[in-house]
Amino acid sequence: MKRFDKGYIYSNLLTDLFFSIVTVFVFLQDIFLNEESTPEDIAVATPIFIIATAVLYLCLVIYRILYYRLSGYELTDKEIRCNRGVLFRKRSVLDYKRVHAINKKQSIFHRIFGVAVLTVDSGSANTSHQAEITIVEKSAVVDALLDELNALKENGVRSETVEPKAEEVLLSESDSLYNFTSAKKMLYTLINIATTAFFTVLFAVLAIIVIGICKGVLQLDILGTWGQYFLFAILITAGGVLIFSVFAFLGSILHSFVGYYGFTIKKRDNNIQITYGLLEKHTNTFSYDRIKAVKISQGLIQRLFGFASIRLEVIGYTMNSGDDNKNADLGVLVPFCKYDEIGEILGKILPEYIPSEKETKSVSFFPFISWFLLVFGIVATIILTTMVAVMAAAGAPPVIIVAVALAIFGVAVVVLVFKLISALLSYHTNGLSVRDGKLTVYSGGFQKTITVFMSKHLVAVENVTTPLRKKHGIASVVMHLKTNASSNEIKVHIQQEALSGELEELLIL
Protein backbone atom coordinates (compact mmCIF):
# COMPACT_ATOMS: atom_id res chain seq x y z
CA MET A 1 0.00 0.00 0.00
CA LYS A 2 1.42 3.37 -1.03
CA ARG A 3 1.82 6.03 1.65
CA PHE A 4 0.58 9.57 1.28
CA ASP A 5 3.07 12.14 0.07
CA LYS A 6 5.32 13.71 2.74
CA GLY A 7 4.04 17.10 1.68
CA TYR A 8 1.02 16.24 3.81
CA ILE A 9 3.18 16.48 6.94
CA TYR A 10 4.94 19.69 5.93
CA SER A 11 1.79 21.55 4.84
CA ASN A 12 -0.12 20.60 7.97
CA LEU A 13 2.75 21.47 10.29
CA LEU A 14 2.57 25.08 9.07
CA THR A 15 -1.13 25.15 9.87
CA ASP A 16 -0.53 23.44 13.22
CA LEU A 17 2.10 26.02 14.19
CA PHE A 18 -0.36 28.85 13.66
CA PHE A 19 -3.07 26.89 15.49
CA SER A 20 -0.78 26.23 18.48
CA ILE A 21 0.22 29.89 18.83
CA VAL A 22 -3.39 31.14 18.61
CA THR A 23 -4.75 28.49 20.98
CA VAL A 24 -2.22 29.16 23.75
CA PHE A 25 -2.55 32.92 23.29
CA VAL A 26 -6.34 32.68 23.74
CA PHE A 27 -5.85 31.01 27.13
CA LEU A 28 -3.26 33.59 28.23
CA GLN A 29 -4.80 36.68 26.65
CA ASP A 30 -5.94 38.06 30.03
CA ILE A 31 -2.31 38.44 31.01
CA PHE A 32 -0.98 39.89 27.75
CA LEU A 33 -3.94 42.18 26.96
CA ASN A 34 -5.03 43.20 30.44
CA GLU A 35 -4.26 46.85 31.17
CA GLU A 36 -3.58 45.98 34.80
CA SER A 37 -0.85 43.48 33.89
CA THR A 38 2.62 44.66 34.87
CA PRO A 39 5.82 44.05 32.87
CA GLU A 40 6.74 41.49 35.53
CA ASP A 41 3.49 39.58 34.89
CA ILE A 42 4.15 39.52 31.15
CA ALA A 43 7.76 38.44 31.76
CA VAL A 44 6.54 35.50 33.88
CA ALA A 45 3.83 34.55 31.36
CA THR A 46 6.13 34.63 28.30
CA PRO A 47 8.07 31.42 29.14
CA ILE A 48 4.78 29.70 29.95
CA PHE A 49 3.42 30.79 26.56
CA ILE A 50 6.52 29.48 24.75
CA ILE A 51 6.58 26.16 26.62
CA ALA A 52 2.82 25.56 26.20
CA THR A 53 3.02 26.37 22.50
CA ALA A 54 6.00 24.04 22.05
CA VAL A 55 4.27 21.17 23.90
CA LEU A 56 1.05 21.53 21.93
CA TYR A 57 2.94 21.80 18.66
CA LEU A 58 5.03 18.74 19.51
CA CYS A 59 1.87 16.72 20.11
CA LEU A 60 0.52 17.79 16.73
CA VAL A 61 3.86 16.93 15.07
CA ILE A 62 3.72 13.43 16.55
CA TYR A 63 0.10 13.05 15.39
CA ARG A 64 0.95 14.12 11.82
CA ILE A 65 3.90 11.74 11.64
CA LEU A 66 1.83 8.83 12.94
CA TYR A 67 -1.00 9.71 10.54
CA TYR A 68 1.47 9.70 7.65
CA ARG A 69 3.03 6.36 8.65
CA LEU A 70 -0.33 4.65 9.23
CA SER A 71 -2.17 6.00 6.17
CA GLY A 72 -2.02 5.02 2.52
CA TYR A 73 -3.94 3.86 -0.52
CA GLU A 74 -3.92 1.19 -3.20
CA LEU A 75 -5.59 0.76 -6.59
CA THR A 76 -6.34 -2.91 -7.25
CA ASP A 77 -7.94 -4.49 -10.31
CA LYS A 78 -11.52 -3.76 -9.22
CA GLU A 79 -11.40 -1.39 -6.25
CA ILE A 80 -9.59 1.39 -4.48
CA ARG A 81 -8.50 0.87 -0.88
CA CYS A 82 -7.52 3.44 1.71
CA ASN A 83 -6.27 3.32 5.31
CA ARG A 84 -6.10 6.42 7.48
CA GLY A 85 -6.34 7.58 11.07
CA VAL A 86 -4.33 7.30 14.28
CA LEU A 87 -6.47 6.82 17.38
CA PHE A 88 -9.47 5.76 15.28
CA ARG A 89 -8.31 3.70 12.34
CA LYS A 90 -10.45 3.66 9.23
CA ARG A 91 -10.16 1.23 6.34
CA SER A 92 -12.23 1.99 3.25
CA VAL A 93 -12.78 -0.13 0.15
CA LEU A 94 -14.67 1.27 -2.81
CA ASP A 95 -15.51 -0.52 -6.04
CA TYR A 96 -14.66 1.52 -9.13
CA LYS A 97 -18.18 1.18 -10.51
CA ARG A 98 -19.58 2.76 -7.33
CA VAL A 99 -17.46 5.90 -7.66
CA HIS A 100 -19.71 8.81 -8.53
CA ALA A 101 -18.02 11.95 -7.21
CA ILE A 102 -14.37 12.98 -7.05
CA ASN A 103 -12.98 16.17 -5.54
CA LYS A 104 -9.50 17.65 -5.71
CA LYS A 105 -8.71 20.25 -3.03
CA GLN A 106 -5.60 22.40 -2.61
CA SER A 107 -5.11 24.88 0.21
CA ILE A 108 -2.46 27.59 0.00
CA PHE A 109 -0.15 25.48 2.21
CA HIS A 110 -0.72 22.46 -0.02
CA ARG A 111 0.39 24.52 -3.01
CA ILE A 112 3.60 25.56 -1.26
CA PHE A 113 4.61 21.90 -1.01
CA GLY A 114 2.97 20.84 -4.29
CA VAL A 115 0.43 18.42 -2.85
CA ALA A 116 -3.35 18.09 -3.15
CA VAL A 117 -6.12 16.16 -1.41
CA LEU A 118 -8.29 13.83 -3.48
CA THR A 119 -11.59 12.63 -1.99
CA VAL A 120 -13.62 9.88 -3.65
CA ASP A 121 -17.26 9.27 -2.77
CA SER A 122 -19.72 6.49 -3.61
CA GLY A 123 -22.84 8.57 -3.02
CA SER A 124 -24.05 6.41 -0.14
CA ALA A 125 -26.46 8.26 2.15
CA ASN A 126 -24.92 6.38 5.11
CA THR A 127 -21.59 8.14 4.52
CA SER A 128 -22.96 11.49 3.36
CA HIS A 129 -21.06 13.34 6.13
CA GLN A 130 -17.67 12.38 4.64
CA ALA A 131 -16.00 10.83 1.60
CA GLU A 132 -15.06 7.15 1.75
CA ILE A 133 -11.59 7.60 0.25
CA THR A 134 -9.06 10.34 1.02
CA ILE A 135 -5.68 10.51 -0.73
CA VAL A 136 -2.89 13.07 -0.24
CA GLU A 137 -0.45 13.11 -3.16
CA LYS A 138 1.57 15.41 -5.40
CA SER A 139 -0.71 17.66 -7.43
CA ALA A 140 0.31 16.05 -10.74
CA VAL A 141 -0.32 12.57 -9.29
CA VAL A 142 -3.77 13.66 -8.06
CA ASP A 143 -4.61 14.98 -11.55
CA ALA A 144 -3.61 11.64 -13.07
CA LEU A 145 -5.61 9.73 -10.44
CA LEU A 146 -8.63 11.92 -11.07
CA ASP A 147 -8.58 11.16 -14.80
CA GLU A 148 -7.86 7.47 -14.20
CA LEU A 149 -10.71 7.09 -11.71
CA ASN A 150 -13.08 8.83 -14.12
CA ALA A 151 -12.16 6.19 -16.69
CA LEU A 152 -12.28 3.29 -14.21
CA LYS A 153 -15.75 4.08 -12.94
CA GLU A 154 -16.99 3.51 -16.50
CA ASN A 155 -14.93 0.35 -17.15
CA GLY A 156 -14.99 -1.08 -13.63
CA VAL A 157 -11.70 -2.96 -14.08
CA ARG A 158 -8.15 -1.68 -13.91
CA SER A 159 -5.57 -3.15 -16.26
CA GLU A 160 -2.42 -2.13 -18.06
CA THR A 161 -4.43 -1.43 -21.21
CA VAL A 162 -6.81 1.00 -19.52
CA GLU A 163 -5.70 4.51 -20.33
CA PRO A 164 -7.29 7.65 -18.93
CA LYS A 165 -9.46 9.32 -21.48
CA ALA A 166 -7.92 12.33 -23.12
CA GLU A 167 -9.61 15.38 -21.72
CA GLU A 168 -9.41 18.93 -22.91
CA VAL A 169 -7.74 21.07 -20.26
CA LEU A 170 -9.85 23.96 -19.05
CA LEU A 171 -7.41 26.86 -19.25
CA SER A 172 -9.47 29.95 -18.50
CA GLU A 173 -12.86 31.22 -17.44
CA SER A 174 -13.70 31.91 -21.09
CA ASP A 175 -13.81 28.12 -21.67
CA SER A 176 -16.42 27.66 -18.95
CA LEU A 177 -20.12 26.97 -19.49
CA TYR A 178 -20.73 29.76 -16.97
CA ASN A 179 -18.56 32.81 -16.28
CA PHE A 180 -18.64 34.36 -12.82
CA THR A 181 -17.31 37.70 -13.99
CA SER A 182 -15.99 40.53 -11.81
CA ALA A 183 -19.16 42.53 -12.51
CA LYS A 184 -21.32 39.64 -11.25
CA LYS A 185 -19.11 39.26 -8.20
CA MET A 186 -19.57 42.95 -7.34
CA LEU A 187 -23.34 42.63 -7.74
CA TYR A 188 -23.22 39.50 -5.59
CA THR A 189 -21.38 41.50 -2.92
CA LEU A 190 -23.83 44.41 -3.07
CA ILE A 191 -26.82 42.06 -2.77
CA ASN A 192 -25.28 40.49 0.34
CA ILE A 193 -24.70 43.95 1.81
CA ALA A 194 -28.32 44.94 1.11
CA THR A 195 -29.56 41.74 2.78
CA THR A 196 -27.43 42.42 5.87
CA ALA A 197 -28.61 46.04 6.00
CA PHE A 198 -32.26 44.93 5.78
CA PHE A 199 -32.08 42.69 8.83
CA THR A 200 -29.98 45.26 10.70
CA VAL A 201 -32.69 47.85 10.14
CA LEU A 202 -35.35 45.37 11.27
CA PHE A 203 -33.64 44.75 14.62
CA ALA A 204 -32.90 48.45 15.00
CA VAL A 205 -36.60 49.23 14.57
CA LEU A 206 -37.44 46.75 17.33
CA ALA A 207 -34.92 48.42 19.64
CA ILE A 208 -36.21 51.92 18.80
CA ILE A 209 -39.81 50.84 19.55
CA VAL A 210 -38.86 49.40 22.94
CA ILE A 211 -36.71 52.39 23.97
CA GLY A 212 -39.25 54.87 22.58
CA ILE A 213 -42.08 53.34 24.60
CA CYS A 214 -39.94 53.42 27.73
CA LYS A 215 -39.11 57.09 27.11
CA GLY A 216 -42.71 58.05 26.52
CA VAL A 217 -44.09 56.23 29.55
CA LEU A 218 -41.27 56.76 32.01
CA GLN A 219 -40.42 60.32 30.92
CA LEU A 220 -36.71 59.50 30.80
CA ASP A 221 -34.95 62.84 30.60
CA ILE A 222 -31.67 61.08 29.89
CA LEU A 223 -32.94 60.42 26.35
CA GLY A 224 -33.55 64.15 25.74
CA THR A 225 -36.48 65.62 23.87
CA TRP A 226 -38.41 63.65 21.26
CA GLY A 227 -36.48 65.44 18.52
CA GLN A 228 -33.18 64.48 20.11
CA TYR A 229 -34.38 60.92 20.69
CA PHE A 230 -35.33 60.37 17.05
CA LEU A 231 -32.07 61.98 15.91
CA PHE A 232 -30.10 59.61 18.14
CA ALA A 233 -32.21 56.66 16.97
CA ILE A 234 -31.57 57.48 13.32
CA LEU A 235 -27.84 57.97 13.91
CA ILE A 236 -27.55 54.72 15.87
CA THR A 237 -29.47 52.83 13.16
CA ALA A 238 -27.35 54.35 10.39
CA GLY A 239 -24.17 53.57 12.34
CA GLY A 240 -25.24 49.97 12.92
CA VAL A 241 -26.12 49.51 9.25
CA LEU A 242 -22.78 51.03 8.24
CA ILE A 243 -20.76 48.80 10.57
CA PHE A 244 -22.55 45.60 9.55
CA SER A 245 -22.36 46.63 5.89
CA VAL A 246 -18.59 47.08 6.12
CA PHE A 247 -18.17 43.59 7.57
CA ALA A 248 -20.61 42.19 5.00
CA PHE A 249 -18.70 43.95 2.21
CA LEU A 250 -15.33 42.58 3.33
CA GLY A 251 -16.74 39.08 3.83
CA SER A 252 -18.53 39.07 0.47
CA ILE A 253 -15.50 40.44 -1.37
CA LEU A 254 -13.32 37.68 0.07
CA HIS A 255 -15.94 35.03 -0.59
CA SER A 256 -16.72 36.09 -4.16
CA PHE A 257 -13.28 37.15 -5.44
CA VAL A 258 -11.15 34.72 -3.43
CA GLY A 259 -13.50 31.81 -2.68
CA TYR A 260 -14.90 31.75 -6.23
CA TYR A 261 -11.70 32.77 -8.01
CA GLY A 262 -11.44 31.16 -11.46
CA PHE A 263 -14.92 29.65 -11.18
CA THR A 264 -15.47 27.34 -14.15
CA ILE A 265 -17.96 24.63 -15.12
CA LYS A 266 -17.27 22.01 -17.74
CA LYS A 267 -18.86 18.80 -18.97
CA ARG A 268 -16.48 15.86 -19.19
CA ASP A 269 -18.32 13.02 -20.95
CA ASN A 270 -20.90 11.87 -18.37
CA ASN A 271 -19.35 14.07 -15.67
CA ILE A 272 -19.65 17.67 -14.59
CA GLN A 273 -16.48 19.38 -13.36
CA ILE A 274 -16.57 22.54 -11.23
CA THR A 275 -13.33 24.37 -10.41
CA TYR A 276 -12.96 27.40 -8.11
CA GLY A 277 -10.88 28.97 -5.34
CA LEU A 278 -7.69 30.96 -4.89
CA LEU A 279 -6.35 30.22 -1.41
CA GLU A 280 -8.04 26.82 -1.42
CA LYS A 281 -8.61 25.47 -4.91
CA HIS A 282 -11.32 22.87 -5.55
CA THR A 283 -11.85 20.68 -8.60
CA ASN A 284 -15.10 18.75 -8.14
CA THR A 285 -16.10 16.01 -10.55
CA PHE A 286 -19.33 14.04 -10.25
CA SER A 287 -21.53 11.93 -12.48
CA TYR A 288 -24.37 13.63 -14.34
CA ASP A 289 -26.76 10.76 -13.67
CA ARG A 290 -26.13 10.89 -9.90
CA ILE A 291 -27.53 14.38 -9.49
CA LYS A 292 -30.78 14.14 -7.55
CA ALA A 293 -32.07 17.70 -7.67
CA VAL A 294 -31.32 21.26 -8.72
CA LYS A 295 -32.28 24.03 -6.29
CA ILE A 296 -32.72 27.62 -7.41
CA SER A 297 -32.67 30.04 -4.47
CA GLN A 298 -33.72 33.67 -4.19
CA GLY A 299 -33.46 35.77 -1.05
CA LEU A 300 -35.83 38.70 -0.63
CA ILE A 301 -33.34 41.25 -1.97
CA GLN A 302 -32.42 38.94 -4.85
CA ARG A 303 -36.11 38.63 -5.74
CA LEU A 304 -36.54 42.40 -5.77
CA PHE A 305 -33.65 42.84 -8.22
CA GLY A 306 -34.19 39.65 -10.25
CA PHE A 307 -31.16 37.53 -9.26
CA ALA A 308 -30.76 33.94 -8.07
CA SER A 309 -28.26 31.18 -7.26
CA ILE A 310 -28.31 27.53 -8.34
CA ARG A 311 -27.25 24.60 -6.18
CA LEU A 312 -27.05 20.86 -6.70
CA GLU A 313 -28.19 17.97 -4.54
CA VAL A 314 -25.63 15.20 -4.98
CA ILE A 315 -25.72 12.34 -2.49
CA GLY A 316 -22.90 12.43 0.02
CA TYR A 317 -21.32 15.57 -1.36
CA THR A 318 -23.05 18.69 -0.07
CA MET A 319 -22.36 17.89 3.58
CA ASN A 320 -18.72 16.80 3.62
CA SER A 321 -16.96 17.76 6.82
CA GLY A 322 -14.02 16.61 8.87
CA ASP A 323 -10.25 16.49 8.60
CA ASP A 324 -9.47 16.07 4.91
CA ASN A 325 -13.06 15.96 3.72
CA LYS A 326 -14.26 19.48 4.48
CA ASN A 327 -15.92 21.02 1.44
CA ALA A 328 -18.79 23.32 2.36
CA ASP A 329 -19.54 24.86 -1.04
CA LEU A 330 -19.48 21.73 -3.16
CA GLY A 331 -23.21 21.96 -3.80
CA VAL A 332 -22.88 25.28 -5.64
CA LEU A 333 -23.47 25.10 -9.39
CA VAL A 334 -23.95 28.81 -10.17
CA PRO A 335 -23.26 31.23 -7.27
CA PHE A 336 -25.05 34.21 -8.80
CA CYS A 337 -26.94 34.94 -12.01
CA LYS A 338 -29.95 36.80 -13.36
CA TYR A 339 -33.19 34.93 -12.81
CA ASP A 340 -34.03 35.25 -16.50
CA GLU A 341 -30.75 33.50 -17.41
CA ILE A 342 -31.49 30.31 -15.48
CA GLY A 343 -33.07 28.52 -18.44
CA GLU A 344 -30.14 29.40 -20.70
CA ILE A 345 -27.51 28.35 -18.13
CA LEU A 346 -29.18 25.04 -17.28
CA GLY A 347 -29.75 24.43 -20.99
CA LYS A 348 -25.96 24.26 -21.42
CA ILE A 349 -25.20 22.25 -18.29
CA LEU A 350 -28.30 20.32 -17.15
CA PRO A 351 -31.01 20.65 -19.82
CA GLU A 352 -33.23 18.04 -18.13
CA TYR A 353 -33.46 20.23 -15.02
CA ILE A 354 -34.83 23.44 -16.55
CA PRO A 355 -37.74 24.42 -14.24
CA SER A 356 -41.29 24.22 -15.57
CA GLU A 357 -43.95 26.84 -14.95
CA LYS A 358 -46.02 26.35 -11.80
CA GLU A 359 -49.23 24.38 -12.49
CA THR A 360 -50.75 24.38 -8.98
CA LYS A 361 -50.94 27.06 -6.31
CA SER A 362 -51.87 27.47 -2.66
CA VAL A 363 -55.63 27.45 -2.24
CA SER A 364 -55.97 29.29 1.10
CA PHE A 365 -53.98 31.99 2.89
CA PHE A 366 -55.14 31.53 6.49
CA PRO A 367 -53.38 28.13 7.09
CA PHE A 368 -50.03 29.85 6.47
CA ILE A 369 -50.57 32.02 9.54
CA SER A 370 -53.04 30.09 11.71
CA TRP A 371 -50.61 27.93 13.70
CA PHE A 372 -48.23 30.86 14.16
CA LEU A 373 -51.03 33.05 15.46
CA LEU A 374 -52.10 30.35 17.92
CA VAL A 375 -48.61 29.51 19.24
CA PHE A 376 -47.29 33.07 19.16
CA GLY A 377 -50.43 34.39 20.85
CA ILE A 378 -50.13 31.86 23.67
CA VAL A 379 -46.39 32.48 24.15
CA ALA A 380 -46.74 36.28 24.04
CA THR A 381 -49.66 36.17 26.50
CA ILE A 382 -47.70 33.96 28.92
CA ILE A 383 -44.64 36.23 28.74
CA LEU A 384 -46.71 39.38 29.21
CA THR A 385 -48.75 37.94 32.08
CA THR A 386 -45.67 36.54 33.81
CA MET A 387 -43.71 39.79 33.55
CA VAL A 388 -46.63 41.87 34.85
CA ALA A 389 -47.30 39.43 37.71
CA VAL A 390 -43.63 39.31 38.76
CA MET A 391 -43.26 43.11 38.70
CA ALA A 392 -46.54 43.58 40.57
CA ALA A 393 -45.45 41.09 43.23
CA ALA A 394 -42.13 42.90 43.52
CA GLY A 395 -43.95 46.18 44.11
CA ALA A 396 -42.84 47.86 40.88
CA PRO A 397 -44.48 51.24 40.14
CA PRO A 398 -47.47 51.04 37.78
CA VAL A 399 -45.68 53.23 35.24
CA ILE A 400 -42.86 50.64 34.98
CA ILE A 401 -45.36 47.82 34.50
CA VAL A 402 -47.14 49.77 31.74
CA ALA A 403 -43.83 50.53 30.00
CA VAL A 404 -42.78 46.85 29.97
CA ALA A 405 -46.23 45.72 28.81
CA LEU A 406 -46.28 48.22 25.96
CA ALA A 407 -42.71 47.31 24.93
CA ILE A 408 -43.60 43.60 24.75
CA PHE A 409 -46.75 44.46 22.81
CA GLY A 410 -44.79 46.67 20.38
CA VAL A 411 -42.23 43.94 19.67
CA ALA A 412 -45.05 41.42 19.20
CA VAL A 413 -46.71 43.67 16.62
CA VAL A 414 -43.48 44.03 14.61
CA VAL A 415 -42.87 40.25 14.71
CA LEU A 416 -46.47 39.63 13.65
CA VAL A 417 -46.18 42.02 10.71
CA PHE A 418 -42.92 40.31 9.70
CA LYS A 419 -44.63 36.91 9.81
CA LEU A 420 -47.65 38.17 7.87
CA ILE A 421 -45.38 39.37 5.06
CA SER A 422 -43.55 36.01 5.07
CA ALA A 423 -46.87 34.12 4.98
CA LEU A 424 -48.13 36.27 2.13
CA LEU A 425 -44.97 35.56 0.12
CA SER A 426 -45.31 31.83 0.86
CA TYR A 427 -48.94 31.88 -0.24
CA HIS A 428 -48.01 33.30 -3.63
CA THR A 429 -44.90 31.12 -4.02
CA ASN A 430 -45.98 27.58 -3.11
CA GLY A 431 -46.98 25.25 -5.91
CA LEU A 432 -45.55 22.64 -8.25
CA SER A 433 -45.52 21.25 -11.75
CA VAL A 434 -45.42 17.61 -12.88
CA ARG A 435 -44.44 17.29 -16.50
CA ASP A 436 -42.69 14.56 -18.53
CA GLY A 437 -41.33 12.75 -15.48
CA LYS A 438 -39.96 15.96 -13.96
CA LEU A 439 -41.22 17.71 -10.82
CA THR A 440 -40.70 21.41 -10.22
CA VAL A 441 -41.55 22.49 -6.66
CA TYR A 442 -41.95 26.15 -5.67
CA SER A 443 -41.67 26.88 -1.93
CA GLY A 444 -40.48 29.40 0.65
CA GLY A 445 -41.36 32.87 1.91
CA PHE A 446 -38.59 35.44 2.19
CA GLN A 447 -36.28 32.77 0.79
CA LYS A 448 -37.86 31.46 -2.41
CA THR A 449 -36.69 28.02 -3.56
CA ILE A 450 -37.41 26.22 -6.82
CA THR A 451 -36.48 22.52 -6.64
CA VAL A 452 -36.31 20.47 -9.83
CA PHE A 453 -35.95 16.68 -9.72
CA MET A 454 -36.95 13.57 -11.67
CA SER A 455 -39.93 11.50 -10.56
CA LYS A 456 -37.66 8.40 -10.52
CA HIS A 457 -35.85 9.93 -7.53
CA LEU A 458 -39.08 10.28 -5.54
CA VAL A 459 -39.16 7.62 -2.80
CA ALA A 460 -42.03 8.71 -0.53
CA VAL A 461 -44.93 11.16 -0.34
CA GLU A 462 -46.54 12.42 2.89
CA ASN A 463 -49.91 14.08 3.22
CA VAL A 464 -49.90 16.54 6.16
CA THR A 465 -53.27 17.95 7.14
CA THR A 466 -55.60 18.70 10.07
CA PRO A 467 -59.27 17.75 10.53
CA LEU A 468 -60.34 21.29 9.58
CA ARG A 469 -58.09 21.41 6.52
CA LYS A 470 -59.17 17.93 5.48
CA LYS A 471 -62.76 19.07 5.67
CA HIS A 472 -61.93 21.76 3.12
CA GLY A 473 -59.89 19.36 0.97
CA ILE A 474 -56.48 21.00 1.51
CA ALA A 475 -53.16 19.65 2.77
CA SER A 476 -49.42 20.17 2.70
CA VAL A 477 -47.35 17.64 0.77
CA VAL A 478 -43.89 16.42 1.80
CA MET A 479 -41.79 14.63 -0.83
CA HIS A 480 -38.70 12.55 0.01
CA LEU A 481 -35.82 12.07 -2.42
CA LYS A 482 -32.88 9.68 -2.67
CA THR A 483 -30.44 12.12 -1.14
CA ASN A 484 -28.83 13.22 2.13
CA ALA A 485 -30.81 12.27 5.24
CA SER A 486 -30.87 15.85 6.53
CA SER A 487 -32.01 17.41 3.27
CA ASN A 488 -34.23 14.84 1.63
CA GLU A 489 -37.54 16.60 2.30
CA ILE A 490 -39.19 18.98 -0.12
CA LYS A 491 -42.42 20.59 1.04
CA VAL A 492 -45.19 22.36 -0.80
CA HIS A 493 -47.85 23.88 1.44
CA ILE A 494 -51.65 24.24 1.37
CA GLN A 495 -52.49 22.50 -1.90
CA GLN A 496 -55.54 20.57 -3.01
CA GLU A 497 -55.51 17.28 -1.07
CA ALA A 498 -55.97 15.34 -4.30
CA LEU A 499 -52.45 16.39 -5.29
CA SER A 500 -50.86 13.91 -2.87
CA GLY A 501 -52.74 11.09 -4.57
CA GLU A 502 -51.42 12.15 -7.96
CA LEU A 503 -47.86 12.14 -6.60
CA GLU A 504 -48.35 8.71 -5.03
CA GLU A 505 -49.18 7.38 -8.49
CA LEU A 506 -45.66 8.40 -9.59
CA LEU A 507 -44.27 6.01 -6.97
CA ILE A 508 -46.28 3.14 -8.43
CA LEU A 509 -45.13 3.95 -11.95
Image (spheres, grey):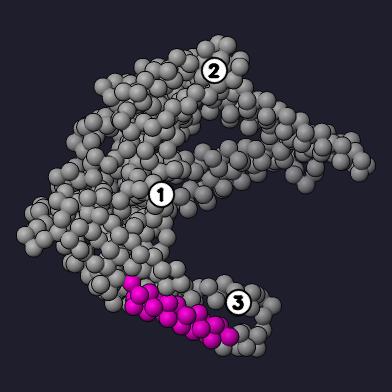
> Who comes first in sequence, dot 2 or dot 1?
1
Which mark is on residue 413?
none
Mark 1: which amino acid? Answer: Asn
The residue at 80%/42% (across/down) is 220
Measured as percent of width and height from the top left, residue 299 is found at 43, 35
Quarter where residue 386 is shown: top right
Is 129 placed left or right of 387 in the picture? left
| Residue 376, image quadrant | top right
Decide which of 261, 93 is in the foreground and name it: 93
Q: Does the magenta-highlighted stretch encompass residue 61?
A: yes
Quadrant for the C terminus in the image: top left
Task: Answer whether labels 2 and 1 touch (C-beta < 8 Å).
Answer: no
Q: Secondary structure at mark 3?
A: helix
Q: How far is mark 2 from mark 1, CA to CA? A: 39 Å
Q: Which residues are magenta?
A: 48-71
x and y percent of residue 182 in the render? 27, 48
Report which residue position mark 2 lands on: 365
Q: CA distance from mark 3 to mark 1?
A: 42 Å
Q: Identify the residue shown where x is 84% and y is 36%.
A: 388
Q: Main secondary structure of the magenta part?
A: helix
Nearest to N terminus: mark 2 or mark 3? 3
Which of discs 2 and 3 lies nearer the camera? The answer is: 2
Q: Please say if 417 is above or below 87.
A: above
